[in-house]
Structure formats: C-alpha cells, structure tokens
Image: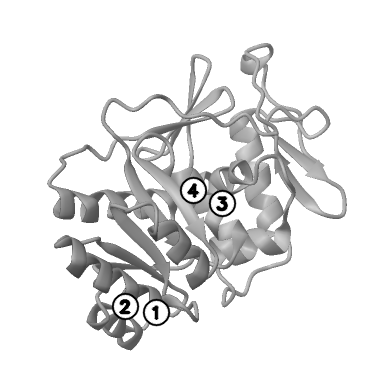
Amino acid sequence: MTDIHVETPRVEAHRALVLHDRQLVVDLIELTLNHGLFVVRAAHNLAEAEAILAEWQPHMTVIDMDHDDSIALLERMGASNTLRRSVTPVLGLTRRGDLQTKLKAFDLGVDDILTVPFSPEELLARSIVITRRATGTDRPIVPTIKLGEIEVDILNRQVHAGSTVIHLSGIEQSLLYLLASRGGRVVTREEALDTIWGTDFVAESNIVDRHIRSLRIKLQNGYRQPRFIATVPGKGYRFIPTFSNEGWDGGADSEK
C-alpha cells in the first residue's frame, strides 16, 4: 500500500464532497485536496452523495457537470443551503470547455468551473479561493504534500527529496500526482493520456513514455532499479513510495 501521509494541519481542514464516476479522477482530486487543507469524501452517483450529505455537511462541493446526476445534486445542495441558511460553494468540472457549457453551469449555480483535464495546482487554488469567499477563512495557497519520503511544493512545482530540490514542468507534476494517487496500483498509458492530456488530444504514441522518462531523469529514478516510478511491462507505470539519499547525487541510470 502506498505510503502517502498528511501532515497535521494547523487549522481545521475544510470538508469537500466530490461527485465523479471515474475513480482515477476521484483519486487525483483526493490526493490534490486532501493534505491538511481539505478532507474529501467522494460519491459516484446521487444516491451516494445524498447518503454523505445526510451525515456530513461539506464546505464545498466538486461536481462533474457532465455527470447524469449533476443537476439533481445541485438542486439538492440548493435546498439544503436554504434550510441551513448557508451557502456551499460549488466547483464544476467539465470536459466541454466551450462558453455555452460554462454559462449554463454558472446559471445552474456553480461558483467556478474548471475544464478537464486540469492541473493539480489550479484545482487546489480554485478550491481554496471559493471556500475563502464562502467561509471568510483566509488561508494561503502555499501547500505542500508528502508522497512517501519526497515532498512536493504544488504551487512552485518543486520536489524536495532529501537535501535536493527538483523543478518540475506542469505535466511532470501532474504525472507524479496521478501515479501517487493510485496507491501503488498501475496507471496505464491510456489512462494517463485521458486524465492529463484529455480524450480529444491527438498525440504521438510515445508521449507518455517520454514525459515519464523526463520525470525519472529529474528524480534520478533508474529504469532497472526504480526509486519512485516502476514500469509494469505491457501495462503502464506505478508509484513506489520509498526514498533513500544513497546515490542521489550520482545520477540515474538511463532508461531504455
């Protein structure tokens, strides 16, 4: 099981309800939000969301606007807010980034909307901002998250491993988060393409492998003796949550 742990927050974590029917995306959202700033509970459909709401009042909701139950949940949240004389802000997600889709979402009561695929840092920043408005809690957008024994500064795209600081590109950070979010389970190339680049992206066949190789080089993650990212032949890649300073400054083996 992946050793992903959360540092104890100095302030009470906000509660976030997520409605999405793709577990891969749910895992990525949970890893991005759930590290001291938010406690996340996820539902795959309206029935599961209502069961959560019956016992747990969120500070914000992340709703997949392409989900068949999205409008029903928005209506349910609206009725709940009226009864409680409160407002639960909603961050909408959609694969359709056209203006008409966004305007419709705002008309339905969404406070902000994010086009999928999204970057982890943008998801987190927007979530913090809309909860700031609703709760009046002022918390900085400077979070870090620990993945095993490496620490990621999500805003500045830096990885701290031992005494070394590594700078990542947006795609490299998204790949690292996606792999880590799966708890040591395999992420296929097709899943990585769909989640990070989107279903409409036309890519050359080795684009995932090239970015994995770039990430491995920066992490000094050898192909034959992987430290963070292991190749699962014929399937894809998985995250290894272990780290040792031994050999860190010695460079990585080349990947073949």
CB atoms at circles 2 and 1 under 8 Å apart?
Answer: yes
To which residue does mark 3 refer? 27
Which quadrant: the C terminus?
top right
Which quadrant: the N terminus?
top right
Q: Is residue 254 visible?
A: yes
Residue sitting nearer the eye, 206 or 139: 139
Looking at the image, residue 168 sits to the left or right of residue 91; the answer is: right
Q: Nearer the viewer, mark 1 or mark 4?
A: 1
Q: CA distance from mark 2 to mark 3?
A: 25 Å
To which residue does mark 1 refer? 72
Which is nearer the N-term, disc 2 or disc 4? 4
Which residue type does callout 4 highlight?
Answer: Glu
Which residue type does callout 2 highlight?
Answer: Glu
To which residue does mark 4 refer? 30
Q: What residue is at 49 percent from the left and 48 percent from the top?
A: 30
Corner quadrant of residue 2:
top right
